[in-house]
Amino acid sequence: VTGSEKGNIYVTFNNLVAARKAIEQLNGMVVGGSKIIVSLHDASLQNNQPVGSVEVILNNVLNENDFEDEDCLNESIEDISNLARKYGQVGSVYAETSGDQSGMVHIEYVEGMTAAQQAVKGLNGMVIGGLIVSATISNDSASNHSTESANSPPSGTQAQTEEKDPEPMLSGDKIIPERFAACKRVPKIPNPGVPRAYASKLNDERAIPILIEMLGELMRLQERNKGDKNARARRRLVMGLREVARGIRARKVKMVVMANNLDEYGAIDSKLQEILDMARAEDVPVIFELNKRKLGKALGKSIKVSVVGVQNSDGAQEQFKKLRKIMGLI
């Protein structure tokens, strides 16, 4: 190539899915000491879905750590992508992290409506990272599919049904946005709210007030330093099964506080046992004094929290040492 486009290399792919996959793998790669930039040559295709593809939208799948830590977000997207591929060929997967649609994850199924419907059936109501996921087919995809169906000749005596919009949900006198209402409509997993067999509580009445005091102070200090550019690297606490497991693996977590009433669910139990096994191997103490709601409250949050890892006890060192003493570690 000569002229203004000198130095550019053009590669032709048979379909847009393969082209996007190449962009995902090659863009930003360093070749010969230079960082290459890969993009679609036809700009009109940048935001278009392949013909016949259908988009599934997931809500309530990302947690607070995903919004605060890019590595966490990338790991979550990779996990979601792997899960999504069980239902069909996946094109692009991306998350909204700002604006009105913040928290939404978009999954593109290139095989069309059948794969998307199977994904919605399999993913809707699934628990991922302690969150109950809401999965729906995007309005645009549904509209496009309806138009295509309307223009296609009828097949046999198949009945045509029109899906009605769900009734709006109210909070006081205000209508809850549909993307949040969809999460609330998902049936909850029964939880008796009592400690499970994995939780061995300390037989010491001093433990709970000391634990609550320590968590509250560490959270306060972490929130105070949130604007610091190095805050992520110096986090006192990490939350969530995946984050705590990662922290133990990296030998950063010094103490684990796990709720004693985690939901009985295959994926959760698997990660729970992984944390307990790693903590035992690394001599990291685990405390089970609080249930999910009380653990969230101790952190100053209105949501339930499954597990917390203490990475840095600075600011609450006295309480940290007292807890270790109660556990017989000092």
Image (cartoon, rainbow, N blue to C red):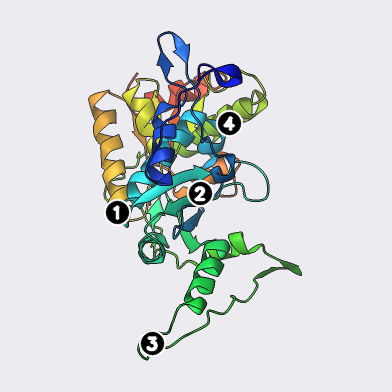
The earlier-in-sequence mark between 1 and 3 is 1
- Image coords of residue 314 (percent x, y): 53, 17
Nearer to us of marks 3 and 2 is 3
Question: Camera-side residue: 15 or 308?
Answer: 15
Q: Between tags 4 and 2, which lies in front?
A: 2
Q: Secondary structure at mark 3?
A: loop
Q: Which mark is residue 105?
A: 2
**Which one is earlier in the sequence, the residue at label 4 or at label 2?**
2
Q: Residue 21: image x %, image y %?
A: 39, 38
In space, the residues marked 1 and 2 are separated at their CA atoms by 17 Å
The tag earlier along the polypeptide, 1 or 2, is: 1
Q: Quadrant of residue 190?
A: bottom left
Name, please, the residue furthest toward the bottom: 157
Q: Nearer the viewer, residue 201 or 65?
A: 65
The amino acid type, in three-letter code, at marker 2 is Val
* Mark toward the start of the polypeptide (1 vs 4): 1
Q: Distance between the Cα atoms at labels 3 and 4?
A: 58 Å
> Where is residue 64 drawn, in percent x and y?
54, 40
Report the amino acid beneath label 4. Answer: Met
Callout 3 touching callout 4 (CB < 8 Å): no
Q: Check if mark 4's residue and mark 2's residue have beta carbons within 8 Å.
A: no
Q: What residue is pinned by disc 1?
A: 86
Which of the two marks, 1 or 3, is nearer to us in this view?
3
What element does badge 4 sit on? helix
Residue 158 tag number: 3
Q: Residue at label 4?
A: 219
Q: CA distance from mark 4 to mark 2?
A: 28 Å
Q: Earlier in the sequence, mark 3 or mark 4?
A: 3
Mark-to-mark CA distance, 1 and 4: 38 Å
Q: CA distance from mark 3 to mark 2?
A: 33 Å
In percent of the image, x 27 and y 23: which residue is there? Answer: 282
Task: Find the distance from the CA under tag 1 to the CA under tag 3.
Answer: 28 Å
